[in-house]
Amino acid sequence: MARFRLERLLRVRERVRQLRQHEAAALAAEVRRLERERSALAAAREQQADGERDSLARAPLDAASFVIGRLYDRGLADDEARRAHERDAMITAREAKRAEVTAARQEERKLERLREAHTARAAEERARDDERLLDEIAARGHRRRAGDDEDDDGGA
C-alpha cells in the first residue's frame, strides 16, 4: 500500500492541538485563580466595611481612622478591579485559545478524511491488482491446458 504522505503532518497537527488544549486548560485555571482572588478581596472589603460599621455603632470615628479606613478600602477596591481586569483578559485569551483548538481539530478531521480516502483508494487498487493477477493466472492455466489438449489431439 502506498504511504499516506500527510501522516506526519497529521501527527504534528495533533500534537500542536494537544498543546493548545493544555494552554487553554492553564488559562482556565488562571481565570479560576483570579476569580478566587477577586472574591477574597471583595470579602475583605465587606469585612472592613462591617468593622467600620461596628466601630461607628460603639463610638464616633476620628478623622484619622476614617481616612485610614477609606485608603485601605480604596486599595482593596483597586486590587479587586485589577484582578477583575486580569480575569477578563484571561477569559478573552482562553476563548481565543479554544477557537484555535477548534480550528486545529477541524484541520485534523480534514486530514483524517484524506487519510481514509487514501486508504480506501489503496485498498481498491490492491483488490484490482489481485483480480488482475488471478485473471492472469487463470489465463495462463487455460493456455497451458489448451496447449496440453492440442498436444494430446496432435499425437493421436
Image (cartoon, rainbow, N blue to C red):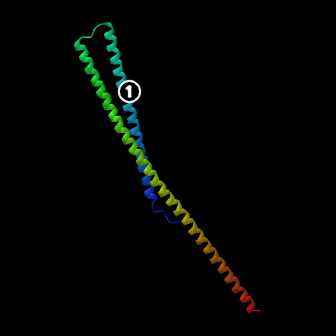
The quadrant holding residue 121 is bottom right
73 vs 91, left or right, is left
Q: Secondary structure at mark 1?
A: helix
Q: Exactly how many numbered labels are in the figure?
A: 1
Residue 101, percent from left and from top: 43, 48
Q: Amino acid at mark 1?
A: Ser
Kindly identify the residue that appears in the image at 58 percent across and 67 percent down: 124
Given the current orientation, which residue lies at the most extreme top position?
A: 58
10 Å neighbourhood of mark 1: few (<14), some, or many (≥20)? some
Residue 136, percent from left and from top: 62, 77
**In the displayed structure, would residue 61 be above or below residue 38?**
above
121 vs 55, left or right, is right
Kindly identify the residue that appears in the image at 33 percent across and 31 percent down: 83
The quadrant holding residue 152 is bottom right
Given the current orientation, which residue lies at the most extreme right position?
A: 156
Q: Which residue is mark 1?
A: 39
Kindly identify the residue that appears in the image at 32 percent across and 28 percent down: 80
**In the displayed structure, would residue 38 be above or below residue 10?**
above
Identify which residue, 51 or 23, lies in the foreground.
Answer: 51
133 vs 48, left or right, is right
83 vs 63, left or right, is right
Image quadrant where one finds the C terminus: bottom right
Identify which residue, 87 or 22, lies in the foreground.
Answer: 87
Residue 60, percent from left and from top: 28, 8
Identify which residue, 7 or 137, lies in the foreground.
Answer: 7
Kindly identify the residue that appears in the image at 39 percent across and 41 percent down: 94
